[in-house]
Amino acid sequence: MKRLMVSLLSVFFVLVAGSAAAQERQDPAAPDGLRAGGTASQTLSADPIAGQPKQAGREVLNYPEQPPVIPHTIRDYQVDKRSNRCLTCHSREDAVDAGAPMVSITHFMDRHKQVLAAVSPDRYFCTQCHVPQTDAKPLVENQFRTVDEVLTEAIREREGGEP
Ligand code: HEC
Ligand code: HEC
């Protein structure tokens, strides 16, 4: 009787394990990307889109040639061949009325540094370089050091102090 129980139980476990394996074959685990993968048949919902930029005004640049981050929302602002919503506030003619900073002189230069009368085609698609700052959680740790930190460290090293 005892032996019968043992063999029945083992058959039971083989069946359970087998069906789990079959299940795994039919619906294999999907790799994790930026969000958890789940299995091939599952569609897990994405994280909510990062919040709107903080309306905290213009931000300090991290280095002199940084394209400043956009301190306002740009939702539904169209930029295409026919119209450029950004320039309705940031162009030379409209900036004063809009109370917006005018695009700087570099935006009028072509690749030979020749200053043109209108914004250069090189600088037409603003979001190629400028992006709004959101409250998104960084995907990787940021090890950026400001130029002031690098300089201070270099000076300290040259003076033979602790690095
Ligand atoms: C309705 C007018 C308006 C539109 C349209 C607009 N902006 Fe602005 N933008 C502003 C104003 C006003 C400021 C200044 C905000 C402040 O000082 O807090 C600003 C600030 C900026 C700054 C920061 C500049 C700096 O030196 O820090 C950038 C970059 C910028 N906008 C890019 C854009 C881009 C790119 C677009 C199009 C996708 C755009 N803006 C559309 C009004 C506008
Ligand atoms: C190829 C990259 C690039 C593109 C495209 C570009 N910008 Fe810039 N922008 C920069 C950089 C870099 C700076 C900061 C240094 C400078 O002024 O050149 C800047 C500065 C600015 C500033 C601040 C000006 C100031 O005097 O402080 C504004 C406003 C701005 N850009 C708006 C725009 C708008 C609007 C567009 C689209 C019509 C645009 N930019 C397209 C790179 C770009």
Image (cartoon, rainbow, N blue to C red):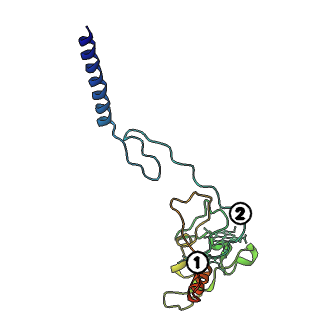
Is label 2 within 8 A of ligand 1 (CB to nearest ligand atom)? Answer: yes
Residue 108, relative to residue 4: is it above or below? below
Is label 1 within 8 A of ligand 2 (CB to nearest ligand atom)? Answer: yes
Q: Earlier in the sequence, mark 2 or mark 1?
A: 2
Q: CA distance from mark 2 to mark 1?
A: 20 Å
Identify the secondary structure beneath mark 2: loop
Q: Residue at x 47, y 42 (%)?
A: 44
Query: 100 or 121, which lies in front?
Result: 100
Q: Residue at x 62, y 63 (%)?
A: 74
The label on residue 55 is 2
Amino acid at the residue labelled 2 = Gln
Amino acid at the residue labelled 1 = Gln
Left or right: 43 with respect to 51? Answer: left
- Ligand 2 occupies quarter: bottom right
The residue identified by callout 1 is: 66
Coordinates of residue 75 in the picture (x, y in percent): 62, 59
Q: Residue at x 58, y 67 (%)?
A: 131
Coordinates of residue 39 in the picture (x, y in percent): 39, 40
Query: 84 or 4, which lies in front?
Result: 4
Packing grade of label 2 (10 A; few <14, some 14-19, many >=20) is: few
Where residue 150 sits, quadrant-wise, is bottom right
Coordinates of residue 138 in the picture (x, y in percent): 55, 60
